[in-house]
């Protein structure tokens, strides 16, 4: 049967299905034949050239983001999978596939409510696995839609500057400009002008487009709902993550993965759905949501 698949060698679409190819890691895969250049090929997917099966890799991602350390995941694998995988490979899979999925999920648009809460949490990142090389103090700036609990935008930053806060606000605006009426933040000075400037002034309304609700924790005011719970969960989960003992880039990827886990994988207790479902992002993810997301990311890239 003729297929529309492009030949990876000559780039023509003159290909047909021809037989199967078997490997231990990936099982049975469809093989193709190119009538233009007379070569056979297997279409590449996200797991191309990985020695381990997609099931095993996504299992590791899932355990990791549920708070199991890479060393514990390694012990689990040793008991159930014959081919040994080191905790370092597990760590690299977490980073790689968080980035793969993020390229897809970053472009999805949630249906948000009226209020988004923005907050920052301080992280101490070991600069190197060897303790004596010191600790860097970084920030994770994130934002939650109070209606759906969707984590709208986040940024792992080396310092808590206006520029970093602005990046998060620009992203919030991109995702929910039509709905958002209130931005709630703590009393940190850097927010004051950035919120107004990012969302802008409406001549028609005679006021700024969003109301900046600044709460002062020192006077006993608090967010007292979603964002604090989010932060507590996040601190509990991320404290075992090895990435915070490495580069900023790896910490960033891991937190991106955690954001995906939070929005798309795990059911939120308050709503008994994932926040992405609550925000009407309908993806029809299968049984293995990590695998579905990776496949969606891969298909979106090629089309
Ligand atoms: Zn060809």
Image (cartoon, grey):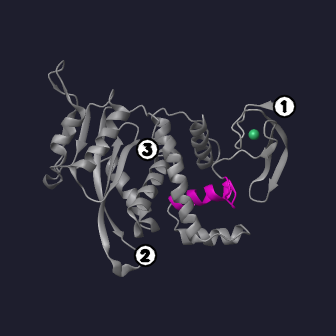
Earlier sequence position, callout 2 versus callout 1:
1
Name the main secondary structure of what is drawn in magenta: helix
Residue 182 vs 220, above or below: the answer is above
Picture coordinates of residue 88 (x, y %)? 55, 69
Side (left or right) of 1 relative to 227: right
Q: Which residues are magenta?
A: 48-65
Mark number for residue 270?
3
Q: Position of residue 103 (x, y in %)?
A: 49, 44
- In this view, the mark in front (2 or 3): 2
Q: Is residue 112 visible?
A: yes
Rendered view: 226 above or below 280? below
Residue at image mark 1 = 1
> Any magenta on residue 99?
no
Of the pair 267 and 92, the residue shown nearer to us: 92
- Any part of residue 241 in sight: no
Query: Residue 41, how many percent across, how many down?
Result: 77, 46
Q: In front: 228, or 132?
A: 132
Looking at this view, name the residue that lies furthest to the top: 204
Label disc, if present, on residue 129 of the rendered structure: 2
Give how far apart the Cα atoms at labels 2 and 3 are.
Answer: 37 Å
Secondary structure of the residue carrying numbered label 3: loop
Which image quarter holds the C terminus? top right
Q: Residues within 10 Å of mark 2 (few under 14, many from 20)?
A: some
Tell me the residue at 60%/43% (across/down): 298
**Label disc, if present, on residue 123 of the rendered structure:** none
Instruction: Assign ligand 1 to one image quadrant.
Output: top right
């Amino acid at each position: 049967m003729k297929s529309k698949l492009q030949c990876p060698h000559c780039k023509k679409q003159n290909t047909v299905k021809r037989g199967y190819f078997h490997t231990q890691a990936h099982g049975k895969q469809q093989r193709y034949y190119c009538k233009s250049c007379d070569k056979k090929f297997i279409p590449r997917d996200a797991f191309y050239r990985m020695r381990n099966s997609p099931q095993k890799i996504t299992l590791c991602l899932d355990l990791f983001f549920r708070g199991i350390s890479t060393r514990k995941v390694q012990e689990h694998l040793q008991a159930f999978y014959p081919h040994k995988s080191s905790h370092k490979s597990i760590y690299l899979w977490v980073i790689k596939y968080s980035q793969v999925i993020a390229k897809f999920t970053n472009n999805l648009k949630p249906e948000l409510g009226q209020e988004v809460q923005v907050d920052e949490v301080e992280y101490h990142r070991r600069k190197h696995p060897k303790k004596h090389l010191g600790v860097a103090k970084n920030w994770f700036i994130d934002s939650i839609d109070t209606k759906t609990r969707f984590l709208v935008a986040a940024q792992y930053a080396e310092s808590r500057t206006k520029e970093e806060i602005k990046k998060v606000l620009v992203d919030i605006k991109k995702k929910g400009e039509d709905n958002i009426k209130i931005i709630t933040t703590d009393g940190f000075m850097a927010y004051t002008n950035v919120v107004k400037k990012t969302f802008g002034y409406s001549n028609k309304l005679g006021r700024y487009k969003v109301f900046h609700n600044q709460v002062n924790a020192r006077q006993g005011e608090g967010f007292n709902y979603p964002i604090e719970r989010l932060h507590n969960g996040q601190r509990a989960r991320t404290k075992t993550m090895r990435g915070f003992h490495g580069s900023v880039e790896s910490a960033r990827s891991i937190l991106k993965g955690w954001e995906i886990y939070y929005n798309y994988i795990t059911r939120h207790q308050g709503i008994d759905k994932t926040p992405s479902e609550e925000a009407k992002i309908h993806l029809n993810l299968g049984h293995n949501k990590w695998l579905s997301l990776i496949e969606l990311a891969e298909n979106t890239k090629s089309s």
